[in-house]
Image: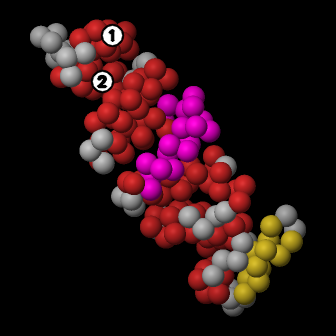
Amino acid sequence: HDQEEALTMSDRIAVMDNARVAQLGTPAEIYENPRTAFVAKFIGEYEFKAKNYSEACKYLGMVSGPDAKTVQVLDLYGKSSYLSKDYPTADRIYKQLAVLSPANPEVFKTLYEIAGRLQKPEDVVTNLRRYTELKPSAAEAQRFLGDLLYDRKEYKGALTAYSAVLRANPSAKGFYKK
C-alpha cells in the first residue's frame, strides 16, 4: 500500500522496515508517537509529499542515528524547513548538506537565499560565490554577485562575475556603466 492509503484508510497499520515490523498500531498512534527513526522518516516523507512542510519538519527532526546524517533525510528536512519558512533550521541543515555534498550547486544556491532572508550579507556573498563557481552558466546569479561585489568596492571580483555573465549570455545588458 502507499503511505496515504495506509494512514487514512486503515484501522491498524504495520510500518515495515526491511521485512520487519518497525511499529504496529492505529494510524493515530503511529502518527502521534513514532517509536523509531524509520517510522519518523516514513511520516516525514508522507507529510512532505502532502506539502505539509511544518509537519514534515516535525517528523524529520525526530530522525536520529545514522539516518539523520544521510543526504536523503537532510535534503528533505532542509527543503521542508525552507518551504515552511523556518530559515534558521534550514540554514543549519543546508550547512550540513554543504559538507556532505560540496559539489552540489543547488545546496549553495539555497544557502545564499537563506542567508539573504536571515540578513547575513557575508554568508550571501560566500555562498553565492560557491554557487557560481559550481554553476558558472547561472548568468543571473553571476550578475547578482557582480553587483554585490561592485557595491562592496571589490572591483576585480565584480569584473570577473560580469565577464562570466557575458560568457553565459553574450546578449546580457544593463551593467556596462559599472
Q: Percent position (x, y) of residue 49?
A: 54, 62
Query: Where's the N terminus, which quadrant?
Result: bottom right
Provide the major secondary structure of the magenta segment.
helix
What mark, if any, has residue 160 been given in the picture? 1
Q: Is residue 156 left or right of residue 3?
A: left
Q: Earlier in the sequence, mark 2 or mark 1?
A: 2
Q: Is residue 154 left or right of residue 100?
A: left
Span shown in magenta: 89-106
Q: Quadrant of residue 155?
A: top left
Q: Percent position (x, y) of residue 142?
A: 33, 21
Query: Where's the C terminus, which quadrant?
Result: top left
**Is label 2 in a helix, a strand or a loop?**
helix
Residue topped by disc 2: 145
Q: Percent position (x, y) of residue 24?
A: 76, 83
**Is label 1 in a helix, a strand or a loop?**
helix
Q: How is the image coloured?
A: secondary structure
